[in-house]
Image: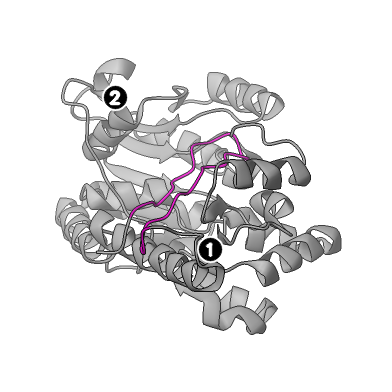
Amino acid sequence: MTDPGDATRFHQAALEYEADVLFGTHALLSGRLFCGSPVPYVLAFGGTDLNDHVHDQETLDVMAGAVTGAAALVAFTQDFMARCGRLWPQVLDRLHHIPQGVWTDPARHFSLRHLLGLSSQDRILLLPSGLRPVKDPLLLVDAVQRWHREDARVHLVIVGHSYDPSFERVVRRRCAVALGVHYVGALSPRQVHAAMAEATMVLNTSLGECSPNALLEAMSLGAAVLVRDIPGNTCVVRHEETGLVFTDPDDFLRQARRLCDDEALRLRLGGAARVQVEARHGMAGERDAYGAILADLARRTSSSAGDRVSLPGAVVVPAVNLAGTPDRVATGAAR
């Protein structure tokens, strides 16, 4: 359902679908609909839930009700586990840490260098970022302009969908006049993966993150990453071990110059990042973790409702897309 309407209508639809379990991303967006549902539900916390919505009493109250009523809760990072536990200690027994799984498939015949007319000697500082204020994609523009005046090989390339037309106009105007800065719009996932693989480094400038999926994808490809010092990034990137972390634009310049000048450093960090992602963010591990949660809920539902579930371990999860982006939904039977 892409337009579920009000909560009463959604609850009725869940019954009509004979759903055993509902799964929603974002405790606020999905929680508004799921609260009071006659069908058990699972909520996965999104970045805005604990970075933004907790600071408004009205949205915090909505999330509190949804979280309290959830059959299970999922946090992608240890940071979000800890924050959720502090806010709602009564749900710790239902809170699960499931790192996001990562899958990449670079397009074989796509080159960002070719698209922009850059040579093999140019340095691409790739920023995969949706155009939203929370992503702060213009943070480094002035710093890169100064660097580009010294070294014309340096280019900041911003790639991503626009989620805010007015903010997109700001970004486009700024990039149009900034030396060495490009906004190329949205690319397909496979094209983004190819761009990550050929970039000199991949950046993250966000003001807040939960589990930065694009960053994990870049790391899985062995790219050197340079990220802003926020908890969502440092949960993934260990400074000097699996990437570099910067505190402000001046610190960014210092760290970025190191990466540009030291190929051995790039290779060491990229290699360690790939190993970390392969170990902690595999698709099979993510699938099995969600399968275990859903199978447990199916067993509980079966034992409490008798004829509710005909096949133990089997679940039906209708996807709800409330934020305008595809939801990642785990379904299946216990293995």
Marking on residue 299? none
Q: Is residue 289 magenta?
A: no
Q: Nearer the viewer, residue 228 or 72?
A: 72
Q: Amino acid at mark 2?
A: Leu
The dominant secondary structure in magenta is loop
Residue, far right? 58
Along the viewing direction, whichever of 266 and 93 lies nearer the viewer = 93
Q: Position of residue 129 (x, y in %)?
A: 49, 38
**Whether residue 243 is visible:** no
Percent position (x, y) of residue 152?
Answer: 35, 28
Give the residue type that dot 1 points to: Ile
- Residue 258 location, quadrant: bottom left
- Decide: is 234 above or below 270: below
Horizontal side, residue 164 vs residue 146: left or right: right
In three-dimensional space, the C-alpha distance between marks 2 and 1, rounded to whole angstroms, equals 28 Å
Q: Is residue 56 visible?
A: yes
Rendered location of residue 75, percent (x, y): 50, 66
Residue 230 got which mark? Answer: 1
Seen at 42% across and 71% down, the residue is: 296
According to the picture, the residue beneath numbered tag 2 turns out to be: 112
- Is disc 1 placed on a helix, strand or loop? loop
Span highlighted in magenta in the image? 311-332
> Is the residue marked by circle 2 packed among few (<14), some (14-19), or many (20+) residues within 10 Å?
some
Mark 2 or mark 1: which comes first in sequence?
Answer: 2
